[in-house]
Amino acid sequence: MKLYDLFTHCLTIPYTKVGLSADYAAEIIDGTLYIYFQDSDGIEDWKSNLNFPCKPYKSMDNEVWYAHRGFLSVWKELEPYVSKLIFDMNIRSIVITGYSHGAAIAVLCHEYVYFHRPDIRKHIRGYGFGCPRVLWGFISAELKQRWENFTVIRNIDDPVTHLPPAIMGYSHAGKMLEIGAKGKYKNIEAHIAKNIQRELLIYESGDKYWS
């Protein structure tokens, strides 16, 4: 599935709300589990987005690492529901996708899947469209491996992908794919879904970018 199609599906699939600010969707196609996380759709989501302080996250192996507190709290709301799907041993590959607020949740879900489904690690893929920074502090090489197949898609001037600021100790997970052209959009325009879609079409068509 092309990135454009994956992103468009993430925008249009019906979501299930859990708790105050957690929205997810899931489907199984040809044995692959697709998990989607919605962008901000209300004041509770924005409260989570702006809840910048980091919080320790303790893995089952007792390794402690730090993440954005607001996003982590949303993931914890979702975890009991999504884990039921993830632990289905009939599932042999998983694709995790999110946009904006949902992209940050996808980062945390991706790590959860990597840790709990070592049997399919080569078949886990994650994509965060317009993804904010989620991780805080020093990230060991071993920990970084958990996101080796996670890709942040940034429309170059998208301000959301530069938050929280790196100066505060935050960093992106996985690889970075930059689309678009510098100066093409003003302020938040680069983060708007239709503009990301436009740049994905250009990127996947192989056309050269224009200013």
Image: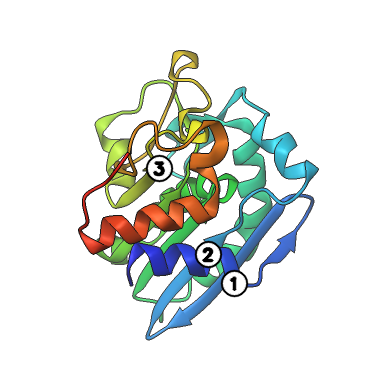
Question: Dividing the picture into quarters, in which one does residue 123 lie?
Answer: bottom left
Q: Amino acid at mark 3?
A: Asn
Q: Amino acid at mark 1?
A: Ile
Residue 13, label in figure: 1
Of all residues, the one furthest to the front in this rendering is: 211
Q: Which residue is mark 2?
A: 10
Question: Alpha carbon of mark 3 to alpha carbon of mark 2: how far?
Answer: 17 Å
Q: Residue at x 20, y 59 (%)?
A: 206
Instruction: Residue at 42%, 83% (x, y): give it.
Output: 29
Q: Is residue 13 left or right of residue 186?
A: right
Question: Mark 1, mark 3: which one is toward the viewer?
Answer: 3
At label 2, which amino acid type do we have? Answer: Cys
Q: Is residue 112 above or below residue 182?
A: below
Q: Which residue is mark 3?
A: 155
190 sits left or right of 4 in the view: right
Q: Which residue appears farthest toward the top when viewing the image?
A: 167
As rendered, which of 109 and 168 lies closer to the eye?
168
Question: What is the total number of numbered labels drawn onto the structure image?
Answer: 3
Where is residue 66? Give x, y as percent.
Answer: 50, 28
Q: Where does the N terminus fall, quadrant-wise?
A: bottom left
- Per the image, label 3 sits on a secondary structure element best described as strand
Residue 197: mark in rendering: none
Q: At numbered mark 1, what does the secondary structure look like: helix, strand or loop? A: loop
